[in-house]
Image (cartoon, rainbow, N blue to C red):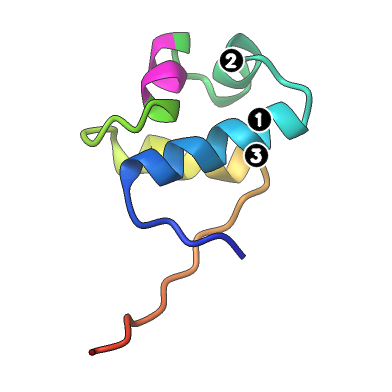
Amino acid sequence: MQHVRSTTDLGAAIRAARKAQGMRQPDLAAACGTSVRFVVELERGKSTAQVGKVLHVLHMLGLRVSLTAADPR
């Protein structure tokens, strides 16, 4: 399990999954129905990316989001 604490972490996880599947950014964009620019900015950690599009990209890469409560310390 990978912990994502920032948009930069999320972008790095998406980039790693894409590369592990042998996809280029244009391939992922086409599969998701988004622009290459969206994928590039997402992988760079753009903090204003649309949540719905981000979730769709994650789904297309076979990634899953799981939320857990933080330790209250």
Is the Cβ of the residue at disc 1 closer than 8 Å to that at disc 2? yes
Residue that numbered label 3 is attached to: 61
Residue closest to the eye, 72 or 32 = 72
Which label belongs to residue 45?
none
Query: Element at badge 2?
Result: helix
**In the picture provided, is 31 more to the left or to the right than 13?**
right
How far apart are labels 1 and 2 at the CA level? 8 Å
Residue that numbered label 2 is attached to: 25
**In the picture provided, is 16 more to the left or to the right than 53?**
right
Query: Residue 56 appears at what percent x and percent y?
Result: 50, 39
Residue that numbered label 1 is attached to: 18
**In the picture provided, is 50 more to the left or to the right than 15?**
left
Q: Main secondary structure of the magenta part?
A: helix
Camera-side mark, 3 or 1? 1
| Residue at the (23%, 89%) spot, across then down | 73
Q: Give the mark nearest the N terminus, 3 or 2.
A: 2
How far apart are labels 3 and 2 at the CA level? 12 Å
Tell me if mark 3 has few (under 14), some (14-19) or many (20+) residues whose alpha carbon lies within 10 angstroms of its own.
some
Tell me if mark 2 has few (under 14), some (14-19) or many (20+) residues whose alpha carbon lies within 10 angstroms of its own.
some
Span colored in magenta: 37-41
